[in-house]
Amino acid sequence: MITVALFAIIVGATLSVLENVMSSASFSQQRGEAMDQVRLALDSMTKEIRQTTMVRPSTASNLDIDTYVGGVPTKVVYSVSGSIPPYILYRTQGSGSSQVVARLKTPNVFNYYYAGSQTPATTAPGTAPLTQIMITFPLGLTHPATDIVLSSAIQLRNQG
Amino acid sequence: MAPTRLSARVRRAHEDERGIAVITAVIVLFVLSLLVATILATGTHLHTSTVRQVHWNQALAVAEAGLNEAVFQLNQDPTWPGTTPANKPCDSDPNKWIAVPGGSYCVAVTHDTPHLGWKTLVASGRSKTAYGMVGRKIREVLAPPPSFKYAIFSNTTLDVGGSTNCVVTGDIYSVDNMTLANSCKVEGSVMVYRGNLTAGNNVTISRDSWTGGDASGGGDQVLAGNVVVGGNATAGEADCTSAGGWSDIGNSGATVKGDARASGSITVKVEGAKNVQNKHDPCASQPPKVSLPVFSPSVMYQSGMNTHTYGSLPPAPYTGGTPDAAARFNVDKSVSDNGLTKADVTGFSGNYAIWQSNTSQSTPVVLPGELTLAGNTMIVTNAPIVFDGNNFDGNNITITSTQPGVIKPLLVIVSLYAPPGQEMSCSDQGGDCSIWGKNKVQISSDVATLFYTTGMMAFKNSANRGNGALYGGNMDVKNGFEVTYDSRVERVVGFGDVSLVRYSWEELKP
């Protein structure tokens, strides 16, 4: 009887640990996937935005550029969609559109830096040459509710 | 007896707890194993992706180090070939790769690509990780600085005319007074840095007009009947003083579709905002003064230019040379009076420098009446240049491509000839001009042409036309020159303050 009781306690404790482990693993996997997705998106966007040859009128939630894709001059638009969180960032090239990042907590992901100024602006182009575009992705994760923020400061090679 | 023994054994078995520890330990170990495995899997994945990302970024930094090294080397030696020949890829040959902290790079340099004097650099960077090699490749094009942005530019006054073909597609700039003859059509903006703009009847300017006055006066826009300015008109001050009087915009028969702003009066019809300042305010919007780009003749002797030279390069200001340089060029390469045929100037291309001593109106470089270009052509001289079509058809000068629509050459005509004396006796009728079109000059749209002189440029006949730009110290095109600005002339080797600047940067597939 004592053995059974001890066994039950141990199994109960173990299952509790197991549940925590599973929960932790699930969160860890969720975070890992989110990080992977955002890293991939940041790398890909950084690569494209770095080669920007022209910036059309853009805002904190919409970036309209001419860049090189595979060495070919191409118009690319990044725009954040949605009216409440979570927002989704889409990439449009020609008639095709694809999702880049989901779970965004804010639609304002682009900041613009001009020559001679350290203060970021939320619109482009400006009167001074555009030197840098900063992307910031604040993501909302669940179970437990956690925020992670990844950002990339991109020096523009074909501007200024 | 037997049942009793069996019952006892069963009872003992139930009371025997040996082995339970093993089962418990196995379960606990199993759970712990799951925990460790999960942590390890997550950690390993994170480590792998982080390492790859670090090296992926490192490979780009290494490739850029290669580009920077190439720019440095090219400043030392414009013929630097790179770490690998341009036609040989950056393969596994270790001799082509230069090790730097974080990886190694390989650079290929292609000279005169995509245009004369330009350079294309392709740099590969690679970084070794425990999971393999990560590589990236970038291409940078170096070009002369942008020097020619206007369709017509005069460093002093400018007289543009021609009632039938005064069509300028692009912007016009003059430092001093500008005159646009009746019916001139400007598809662009007009800027007079320090002087008056006089526009005849029915002139149209599709974009803005800007004039600036200074202590000696000027800055007025004298717009005749039916003149239309499509954008904004501003009559300001080049020197921000009212010493020369206020600048005005008139007259009543003209229309400004945008806003009009003047330090003096405005009498034209204004469809936008009318802003009479009577103060120096328009000075605040004054565009900076633009100077005639400076040409460096020594560029003709940079490696790769393969310049054909007539006479020896004189020191600045390039007034010397040899007595027969122009005559020899004319005999060799033009349709001078020596009876060369059209075949001699068909498939013309390359770089030519003609350095004439004792230059004067009577020592011109005579360009042929018919020129068919097989490639980019640059003709530079310190003598006057005359376009003379008499030798072929007695009328036109035609410049075309040997393969219309296929070969689209750049033609650069440079005369550094400065007529002696303060006043140049040059007009559309000829005289002591630096560049003079004696006959009608017609250039096909395949050819982008830059006419450049520090002296005076004039054209006699009407119906001149071409794509490109006209840049002169002084200019008289009152008989008309239909010019369509062509951005191919924006960057020409030899012009500008610095040798080469970044034109484009792009990442290629490794």
Image: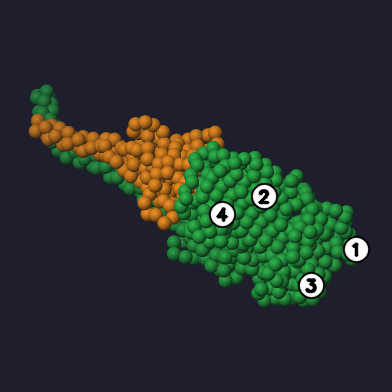
Q: What amino acid is found at the position of numbered circle 4 in the picture?
A: Gly
Q: What amino acid is found at the position of numbered circle 2 in the picture?
A: Leu
Q: Secondary structure at mark 3?
A: helix
Residue denoted by label 3:
B325
Cα gap from disc 1 to disc 3, whole angstroms: 18 Å
Q: Secondary structure at mark 2?
A: strand
Q: Position of residue B288 (x, y in %)?
A: 52, 57
Dot 1 or dot 4, earlier in sequence: 4
Which one is in front in this view, the residue at disc 1 or the one at disc 2?
2
Dot 1 or dot 2, earlier in sequence: 2
* Residue A150 at least partly seen: yes
Residue plotted at (52% across, 39% down): B272
Residue denoted by label 2:
B180
Q: Is residue B465 above or below residue B81?
A: above
Which quadrant would the N terminus of chain B be assigned to in this image? top left
Dot 3 or dot 4, earlier in sequence: 4
Residue denoted by label 4:
B219
Q: Colour of chain A?
A: orange
Give the chain ID for the green colour.
B
Cα gap from disc 3 to disc 4, whole angstroms: 44 Å
Dot 3: few (<14), some (14–19), or many (≥20) neighbours within 10 Å? many
